[in-house]
Amino acid sequence: MSVIGTIDSVKWLTVYELTMCVISLFVLTVYAVPIKRYRRWFDFLPGAGMLAALASLLSGDTTLLALILDSLTLLVFLGTVRRLYKPKVWTVPNRKIFRIVRRVICAAGVVPIVFALAYAGVMRYNPVSDFSTMNYSKAFVKMNERLSREYPFGEWKQVDWNERRSKYESVFKQAETDKDAALYYRTLREYLFSLRDGHIKIVNDSVYEGNALFKKEVGGGFGLSTVQLDNGKVLVSLVLENSPAAASGIKLGAEIVAWDGKPAKAAFDQTTWSESGMATDKVKRLNQGRFMVRAPIGKEVQVEFRNWGESVSSRTKLTAYDDGFETLKQTKNKLTPADLKSSPIEGEMLDRGYGYVKIKHFLPRSNAASPEKSLAKLLKMFQEKHAKGLIIDLRDNPGGEDQLAADLAGFFVKSTKHYEYVSYYNRYTGKFEQNRNEVVKVKPAKPYYDGKVAILINSRTGSTGEGMPLVLKGMPNIKVIGFTSTAGSFGIMSSPIEIKMPEGYVIRFPDGRSLDQNKRVQGDADQTGVGGAIPDIEIPLNEATFKASVMDGVDVELEYAIEALKK
């Protein structure tokens, strides 16, 4: 944060917010240093400020930034309203103490203005687009038009917005002609997920509860889930007890040879359903394995499988049953209320002499000690016990606040290191511009840990969870390890783009870009599905690592980390 950055932040204010700032600052200055010559028009300035405040509220701007300026404008108006109907020549208080008090009050009034300017970029007004009363196709066109201007990664992902319109507009028109809400919803999801961004969400769409189409098409399970190996084989990674799969003799580790009349690989590749957007191909593969073995309740499928260690395949018929989405829930990690209340950082000294730290999220609000103090305490313990190396586990970390991630990374750097610049769409210039007051740096913190470090990641390491491996990757004592890259969704969600669509759906999109030291987009997947933090050591997903992790319960990533630390 700097003086230049604060002045530059004027560009993020709305016309009404800027008007309130100018009027309030001028009035407070005049009262602090009274003008010698009385001007009647000056008495009407606070009233003009109130008109700007009312206009701001009526425009829908209820951001914290606007409310701070509204409140200040109101106080200035109430403090000067008598002069509207009782004008009088300016006089300076006779007693020095009264003059000082008035100047102190005026100076205090300037503080909210400075605060508003300093954080204008983060708290800026991003109006909600309400297309909910339009027909399907018109709402889609309006959404596509706004995203073509304001979606932060359109250029990065090489999105052809005209091509998107040509592809989907006719389908939306067909849905409105046929009054087919299911087709509309399916097409809306397909369009949104085609942008390949894990931050894009239909926020009021709880797929497990009340989503009729989701229930209809994938509400049935067979009691199993799958993964695809690097060589294309599809293996069973989960079998529920007393399920149709278990009753048919399908065991953990079985190879699915054919599914529902198709070769397993073809069935896998044709699976499209998921709960949310998938930015990278690795995340897509994970979800395809989960959803390939879902179907409408009551559907029968022919399955050819070969249990682990057997040379002969077997055939069976499975019937999908209502399992309450159990296989999906068991294969989708989620933070619990207990995780959010306790410290996000846990650690211990492993038996083999290595330090281990699990960072569950980067959300600072909890009832426990601050994450920085928790990590500092653990690092000090590891140093005192002469740990051979340190393992930082960021697997399944969904993110949180970038500043916290940068602060925790500070224990592993000797000098200040760039974390990110941030840019947002400027509605006045029609361009993305850097917010100069939002520059995140990794600053050295104590105790400095200079030993070997292995950072564990997976495809569920998302958003801010990707920050530490991105910023620390490449340092000589640090290795990033995992089966896959991170989620590839590192966009900023300060004042998200929000669009209300027909059928009551509310959609949110990221509103900012995270930029590296060269001011290029970092972290987010590109149009090819490649992005996120790439492992220095990528663990192969083959028969050996599958058997160890899924069938034998070995933490393969942890074992790879220990081997890397030995070198």
Image (cartoon, rainbow, N blue to C red):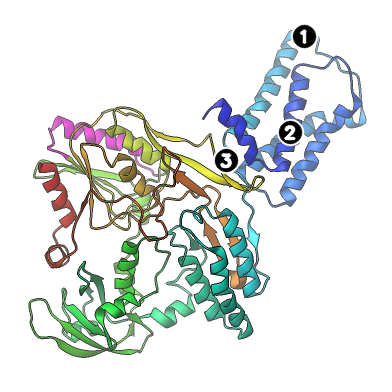
| Nearest to N terminus: mark 1 or mark 2 | 2
Give the labeled residue for mark 2: 75
Range drawn in magenta: 366-389
Circles 1 and 3 in contact, beta carbons < 8 Å = no
- At label 3, which amino acid type do we have? Gly
Magenta highlight on residue 371 = yes
Callout 3 secondary element:
loop
The x, y position of residue 158, in whole percent, is 48, 58
Q: Determine whether, in the image, residue 328 is placed left or right of residue 198.
A: left
Q: In this view, does 471 lie above or below 551?
A: above
Callout 2 secondary element:
helix
The x, y position of residue 325, in whole percent, is 35, 75
User: Which label number is shown at residue 95?
Assistant: 1
Distance, label 2 to label 3, CA atoms, is 24 Å
Magenta highlight on residue 309 = no
Distance, label 1 to label 3, CA atoms, is 42 Å
The x, y position of residue 171, in whole percent, is 56, 78
* Quarter assignment of residue 449: top left
| Nearest to N terminus: mark 1 or mark 3 | 1
| Nearest to N terminus: mark 2 or mark 3 | 2
User: Which label number is shown at residue 121?
Assistant: 3
Crowding near the residue tagged with mark 2, few <14, some 14–19, many ≥20 C-alpha atoms within 10 Å = some
Q: Determine whether, in the image, residue 424 is placed left or right of residue 96.
A: left
**Which residue occupies 47% across, 79% down?**
213
Callout 1 secondary element:
loop
Q: In which quarter of the image is the C terminus?
A: top left
- At label 2, which amino acid type do we have? Leu
The x, y position of residue 150, in whole percent, is 58, 54
**Which residue occupies 83% across, 36% down?**
47
Q: In this view, does 452 lie above or below 41?
A: below
**Which residue occupies 33% across, 37% down?**
408
Distance, label 1 to label 2, CA atoms, is 24 Å
